[in-house]
Amino acid sequence: MRVQIQPSRRLFLAAGPAAAVFGALSQAAAQEQPSAVDQAIERHRAALDELEACCGPEDLPDDVCDRETDALWELAIAPCRSDAELIVKLRYLFAYERRNAMDQQFDMGHDGSLPICLEAHFEP
């Protein structure tokens, strides 16, 4: 004869908090791993360092330029986990574009409103 065990009310009630703890732990573990944005920023920094290590604009090999451009586009389309991560990405991209513009003022007619909005936010 087989004995059937009926789940107790205590076991049922304990399952909710246990699931919440497990969910929080798995979310914390996911947060510890570098995000797609973090990884893309690191790849772009490495490609930019390689580009800057070349002697001058006339000495830039096409493959080095291509790696930097590809890394920049990967960063631009990298998914953000949160609004805070989007701000990190925007801050990095703004600093990159600002540096490339050689600290010139952005122009609404040429650059559009987004760079001007970011400039007002990041450089009040």
Image: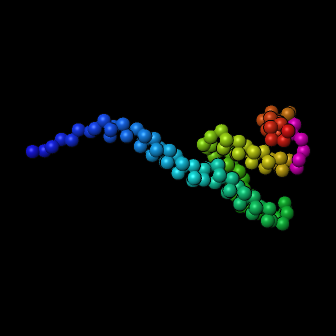
Residue 103 among those drawn in magenta:
yes
**Quadrant into which the C terminus falls:** top right
Residue 5 among those drawn in magenta:
no
The image shows residue 18, relative to residue 69, as above or below, that is above
Q: Position of residue 3 (x, y in %)?
A: 15, 43
20 left or right of 109? left
99 left or right of 37? right
Q: Residue at x 83, y 36 (%)?
A: 120
Residue that lies at the very extreme toward the right in this rendered image? 104
Q: Residue at x 54, y 48 (%)?
A: 28
To which quarter of the image does residue 9 belong?
top left
Is residue 10 visible in the rendered image? The answer is yes
Q: Position of residue 20 (x, y in %)?
A: 45, 41
Label the magenta part by its dominant secondary structure: loop
**Quadrant into which the N terminus falls:** top left
The image shows residue 95, relative to residue 66, as above or below, that is above
Q: Residue at x 75, y 63 (%)?
A: 50
Q: Position of residue 71 (x, y in %)?
A: 68, 53
Residue that lies at the very extreme toward the front in this rendered image? 10
The image shows residue 107, relative to residue 96, as above or below, that is above
To which quarter of the image does residue 117 belong?
top right
61 left or right of 31? right
Is residue 62 visible in the rendered image? The answer is no
Total tally of numbered discs in the picture = 0
Q: Position of residue 49 (x, y in %)?
A: 76, 61
Residue closest to the eye, 42 or 124: 124
To which quarter of the image does residue 114 belong?
top right
The scheme the figure's colours follow is rainbow
Q: Which residues are magenta?
A: 102-107
Q: Residue at x 60, y 50 (%)?
A: 35
Residue closest to the eye, 36 or 64: 36
The image shows residue 52, relative to residue 95, as above or below, that is below
